[in-house]
Amino acid sequence: MLTSRRGFIRNAVAFGAAASASPYLFAESAAAKPFFEISLAEWSLHKSLFANKISNLDFPVIAKKQYGISAVEYVNQFFKDKAEDKKYLSELLLRCRDNGVKNHLIMIDGEGELGSLSEPERTKAVENHYKWVDAAHYLGCQTVRVNAFGKGSAADVQQAAAAGLNKLGEYAQKAGLNVIVENHGSYSSNGEWLLATIKKVNRSNVGILPDFGNFCVRRDTGELYQGKCIEEYDKYKAVQEWMPVSKGVSAKTFDFDAAGNCIETDYNKMFRIIKESGFKGYVGIEYEGETLGEEDGIKKTKALLERVAKTLG
């Protein structure tokens, strides 16, 4: 039945009056959605995965049913031999679709040094990554996370890494994927070095994945990888510098205080920086602590992120 013009006007006036009576109704509705979306990094469950208590195929279902998280970040070592296995990838994709889970990214390790000073070795490393770019595309991911490792001086490795990332970025761009480098040790933990490397690449689809935990720039052994860390790059400074080229955030946690705050990172301070940058993407939970079990650590990190999002509005 059609609404009369008079009835329409009457309803519109009533609607306007209701809105006037509750001026915050629509503002609250708009504010309900946080400025970032939460995803779950598979590394948060690495103990269970290495112990074969769960499998990579179980991961997206666990993320949704156990933690209420609808986006996931895979780690390639948990399905290392499956990058080109379409039957396996189809099963993984089916489980995601059946449970309303979005595949966000794949973290790639162990495929060679993209910053190798040897051009043949670097080319091989780049090409080793191609199958994971293809797998990510098949799964509907937006991004692959890589490392910018290499052996040599900071300047030489930077030059080589920029070349490797440029070539990989070119391949990924054809599939509409981003390539992001995590601060993951060695030179990449130095904020200035990593940002300058990405600027050398100068590709719109190549950026950074800030991880709140990996900022050691000097160890007591003098080695890049081993020994006790005696100097760290300022993580807040790094994230502020990186956000213009960041295409994701890795919310690392280890320990929490009695109020549920992360001990090693001030999340309110960090996420104020992230919000002010205009970031709107995924923030991946990556719990690596020893005090709490994986389940409690993930839940506490999620609760912290939700609280911070509500606090910052």
Image (cartoon, rainbow, N blue to C red):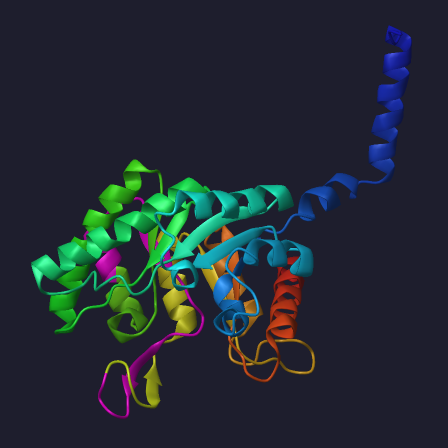
Q: Does residue 126 appear to the left or right of 297 in the view shown?
A: left
Q: Position of residue 169 (x, y in %)?
A: 26, 47
* Closest to the observer, 185 or 234: 185
> Within the image, what quadrant is residue 266 found in?
bottom right
Q: Position of residue 235 (x, y in %)?
A: 41, 72
* Closest to the observer, 88 or 15: 88
Q: On screen, 73 above or below 100?
A: below
Residue plotted at (60% across, 50% down):
70
Quarter of the figure that contains the C terminus: bottom right
Count the numbered circles shown: 0
Q: Position of residue 183 (x, y in %)?
A: 34, 68
Residue plotted at (89% across, 25% down):
14
Residue plotted at (61% across, 54% down):
61
Q: Position of residue 119 (x, y in %)?
A: 8, 58
Q: For residue 275, say whether it is visible.
A: no
Highlighted range, magenta: 196-223
Quarter of the figure that contains the N terminus: top right
> Within the image, what quadrant is residue 268 found in?
bottom right
Magenta highlight on residue 217: yes
Q: Does residue 188 appear to the left or right of 300 in the view shown?
A: left
Q: Does residue 155 appear to the left or right of 194 in the view shown?
A: left
Q: For residue 234, say whether it is visible.
A: yes
Magenta highlight on residue 26: no
Q: Residue furthest front?
A: 87
Residue plotted at (27% across, 53% down):
129
